[in-house]
Amino acid sequence: MSFDIVKRYEHNPILTPDDMPAPCCAVYNSGVVKTPEGEYIMASRFEEPNKTQCIWVSRSKDGINFVPDAEPVKIVCKPEEEEEFNEIVYLNGNKGSLIGSWFDPRINPVGDEYYITYCVGGDYGCRIAIGKTKDFKTIEHVSFPMHVLNRNAVLFPEKINGEYWMLHRPQNAASTSGGFIWIASTKDWEYWGNCKVVAKPEQYWENTKIGPAAPPIKTEKGWLIVYHGVFPNCNGINYGCGVMMLDLEKPWKVIGRCPDPILYVKEPYEMIGQVPNVIFPGAVIPEDDGTVKIYYGGADYVQCLATAKLDDLINACIPR
Ligand code: BMA
């Protein structure tokens, strides 16, 4: 059943390197938000031909046709934070030369603010960064919430039990099979704790690792989350997209889960790109008509779109 509840947009991909106003070899793995005014804002992982990466925003009225901004997002921090920031995001020897990497941005509406979670990859390895934005032109650095070797952070849209919560994926879990979904909380955006394992791979298709994909959606049944799962191929990896339900009050508790992937590699734009066989979801946007738009990166190369009925995703999560 779960195999046909998601429909790909027939004119995928919706954003490609050719659409960008600057030399680009890949634009993908985007986070998306729909503002109260009805504008869709997409923050994408943008790669220059020389492999420098940045976050590039595009905007749309219909969630399908996106127009990129003229330039990438600027990430700024307070003068007293600059040394730490540069140390973490730039590669040694290239400090100040802008050869840093920031990638896989997620747009998280929390209360009436927009938080951007993304990965940075400097000398010490991959680390989560949190920033805040009002205009999606500038991101103000907030913090590096977790230790290194951590990625895929998404934030819950409201406080639960008086705290803010984040799903994330430590890179080296205590298992040869890699990554699990974890949760952490904070009272002040500065100090994070309460780290707990939320979910581990259970099925063959997600055997290598699983990681959070889009910020959780609040439903009557619980927090709906989509996640990516990875299967080891003999020539590499094969990504799929899964769905599970977390308890509204205890968001570290899985109360339902779909055993099958709701989206798995099928189309050429998911098989052929910089990294073949990758579906990397980054946003689920609920619409007034009961459908959701699911945004995902295809083959680490282009940006794609699919749709589903919210109820079908909810019902796909078999209660436990
Ligand atoms: C992950 C991240 C993603 C990427 C995926 C497949 O580790 O780097 O950005 O889409 O690998 O290459």
Image (spheres, rainbow, N blue to C red):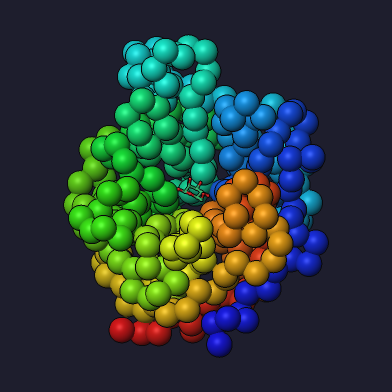
Marks counted in the figure total 0
Could you say where residue 132 lies in the image, as x and y percent from the top left? 47, 35
Could you say where residue 259 lies in the image, as x and y percent from the top left? 42, 80
Image position of 110 (left or right of 185): right
Could you say where residue 253 lies in the image, as x and y percent from the top left? 27, 70
> Looking at the image, which is closer to me, 31 or 269?
269
Can you name the residue that lies furthest to the bottom here? Answer: 1
- The residue located at (49%, 84%) in the rendering is 315
Q: Is residue 306 visible?
A: yes
Compared with 151, 287 (above or below) is below
Image position of 246 (left or right of 108): left
- The residue located at (57%, 70%) in the rendering is 264
Q: Is residue 57 visible?
A: no
- The residue located at (42%, 49%) in the rendering is 152
> Looking at the image, which is closer to me, 51 or 217?
51
Compared with 247, 26 (above or below) is above
Could you say where residue 55 lies in the image, as x and y percent from the top left? 58, 34
Q: In which quarter of the image is residue 157?
A: bottom left
- The residue located at (58%, 50%) in the rendering is 275
In which quadrant will I find the N terminus? bottom right
